[in-house]
Amino acid sequence: MRKLFLILIPFTFMNLSAQQKDLLPYVNTLIGTEKMGHTYPGATAPFGSVQLSPDTDTISYELNGKYNKDVYKYCAGYRYEDKTIVGFSHTHFSGTGHSDLGDFLVMPTVGELKMNPGTAQNPDSGFRSRFSHDEEIAQAGYYSVNLKDYKIKAELTATTRTGFHQYTFPKSNNAHIILDLMSGIYNYDDKTVWTYVRVVNDSLITGYRQTNGWARTRTVYFAMSFSKPFKNYGRKDFDATQVYRGFWRKFNQNENFPEIAGKKIRMHFDFDTEEGEKIQIKFALSPVSQNNALENMQSEIQGWDFEAVKNQTQADWNKELNKIQIEASENDKTNFYTSLYHSFINPTTYMDVNGEYKGLDQEIHKADGFTHYTTFSLWDTYRALHPFFNIVQPSRNNDMVKSMMKHYEQNSLKMLPIWSHYANDNWCMSGYHSVTVVADAIIKGTFDGDANIALDACIVTANKRNYEGIGDYIDLGFIPDERNGTSVSNTLEYAYDDWAIAQAAMKLGRMDVYNEFIKRSQNWRNNFDESITMMLPKKLDGTFRKEFDINDTHGQGFIEGNSWNYSFFVPHDPENLAKAMGGKKKFTQKLNTLFTMHLPDEFFADTEDITREGIIGGYVHGNEPAHHVAYLYNWSSEPWKTQETVRHILEMQYKPTPDGLGGNDDCGQMSAWYMFSAMGFYPVAPGSDWYSLGSPLVDKASINLENGKTFTVESINQSKENVYVKKVELNGKEIKDYKLKHSDIVNGGKLVFYMSKSK
């Protein structure tokens, strides 16, 4: 029997207001750490720059000159299935389907000094340690585990820019803390470009690490302070011998030498410890300089009171969690508040306490009057996460849009971000979905900058002819199959983004722009084959590809999906999509087929993040392109099926267990889908001011809005059986079109669903 890994621990906060509830016990950071959720269990502050978390192995990205498929399991550094921990590093992505990061791995040990992590098959061959989930605590802002091989209790917490370690040692005259500057997630031989360490005194070191990977010019600076002076220190250099070695070789740099540099360096710091003695480490990061890292540390953590820092970070988390208060079953509360926690991890703060950050031009900039953010996984998060922020985190989302605008200003290519990360664009996935986030913020009144300048940036981005088929898309209305391997999905996603631009243009009264982009938004029709009512790749001569498999996810013109999922990707025009598919009844039949068909394993066997558990018929919830599809029944002849299907997805794809996510959380997108749907409404088309109604899972939800108002959702007679909506009322007035406006929410009010067992 699988255990429920929810640890109900009483929390007390001196500043817990009468209106706030203690919601931390409902956050289980182990959810999503098993199988394909790719979340991490460690400590971070809300939207923090530091994500201090255990890594359970060091798998190389490369194996025999090729991609090592096993590395995909370690996108978050931690796998619940593993039995050993190699250390605790300071940067992690939450729920991504690719990775980087894993900077500055720290590992405490006792006994013989080992400077290699060893292997999972033979843990004794290196410095890794066995551990048990029975001796592991994972909470918002706090993580602890017993390192069995060393009898060391490891505890972690974090502020926005500083990780705080506390290690309780046994008695030893041979205790060590290893700092691994080689280790990383998605590692390979040339990943680390350079590292530098400066030993300032017997308890403070500073330095930096430059890596080449998903972000090719990424440099992270650090300051590391020990609560106790080390008695000795040294390094092991794993660099290959070079022909030119310079004259640093005059010194013995391996022992007690204060300035170390190289590509493959591990440091060790040695101590004598008494039984139960605690050694603490403050480890601060900066994108700008070692001095800024030290300033971050000194500003955020004064002294060495681990419990005080932990309590403050958890108080910060509790404040964020109280933005929504729900009444639901215990399991549903755990799913909901863990989802809320995951949605408030990314994007991450990307600036020092003095406001400085490194821009895409590799120059130092200063954020003036706003918080600068990075980690924009926009192909995922434009769909639900940023719309969710427009309700519960509007000030932060305003700053996120401003950060995107700074990205545009500093970008030599003059494009808004595709996938922004540490003063880089990773260019990952398709579409130019930052324009949808920007447009959505303009339309909903979240963005307080110059909206016309922001719209101009959207237009320039959408007209970047040399980026992934945009030139052909503009000229032909579609991207030819011969010229692009993801021609269909790119065309569909561009068409949707163009519709969002058109909506912002209408809001701003720029009708020439509206007319141009509303016409472009209809380009979805160019890949729609009316003879089979499916999306197909179209060739340069205007004919559809003859040899085509609507079930296959590879080589068919789509990215991370097949024709079944992408044929419904017209979220901005569902009424005309239904007509194109033959009318409401045939649209219903098409949707029914998607959710009831059997998709053989062979069609997703090579798709890394899709497993059988994440599939309902042919619908793949673990991949975002179909996230809106259950709500399309509202435009069909049987709208009640939205209610039935949404509840089925909520129950099947989200569970309060380590393997409780049906796919990658993708920087909070899966979590945002859950919270919207659990409250009974969803943003089918971000860039509009309306939401589509579904079937609420909660008995009651009170959204405490930033403007001081409250929007409340109640579901009368809601249960696992009573999933159908008999009637919906907004402030006492019945809603009959299955739509809720954004203004209805932010103005405060009450939405009541009357639930029934019958359709």
Image (spheres, helix red, strand yellow):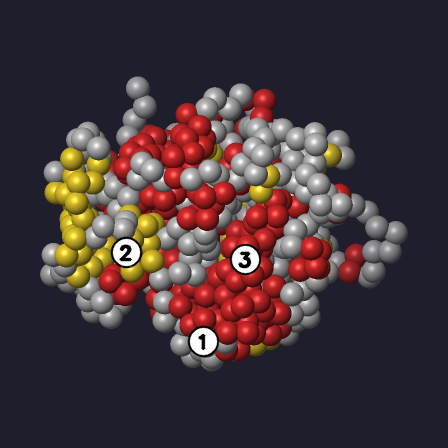
Q: Residue at x 50, y 74 (%)?
A: 511
On the picture, is 545 further left or further right than 132?
A: right
Alpha-carbon span between mark 1 and mark 3:
18 Å
Quadrant including the C terminus? top left
| Secondary element at tag 1 | loop
178 or 338, nearer to the observer: 338
Q: Is residue 1 above or below residue 511?
A: above
Q: Which residue is mark 1?
A: 508
Q: Residues within 10 Å of mark 3 (few under 14, many from 20)?
A: many
Q: How far from the left and from the top, in percent, is residue 88? A: 48, 45
Q: Which amino acid lies under the numbered mark 2 shown in the image of this protein?
A: Leu
495 or 460, nearer to the observer: 495
Eye-nearest disc, 3 or 2:
3
209 or 515, nearer to the observer: 515
- Asked whether the residues under the numbered discs 1 and 3 touch, taking CB atoms below 8 Å apart as contact, a structural biologist would say no
Alpha-carbon span between mark 3 and mark 2:
23 Å
Q: Which residue is mark 3?
A: 521
Which label's residue is closer to the chain start, 1 or 3? Answer: 1
Alpha-carbon span between mark 1 and mark 2:
23 Å
Q: Quadrant of residue 119?
A: top right
Q: How many marks?
A: 3
Q: Is residue 483 visible?
A: yes
Quadrant including the N terminus? top left
Q: Residue at x 11, y 61 (%)?
A: 18
Q: Residue at x 43, y 61 (%)?
A: 687
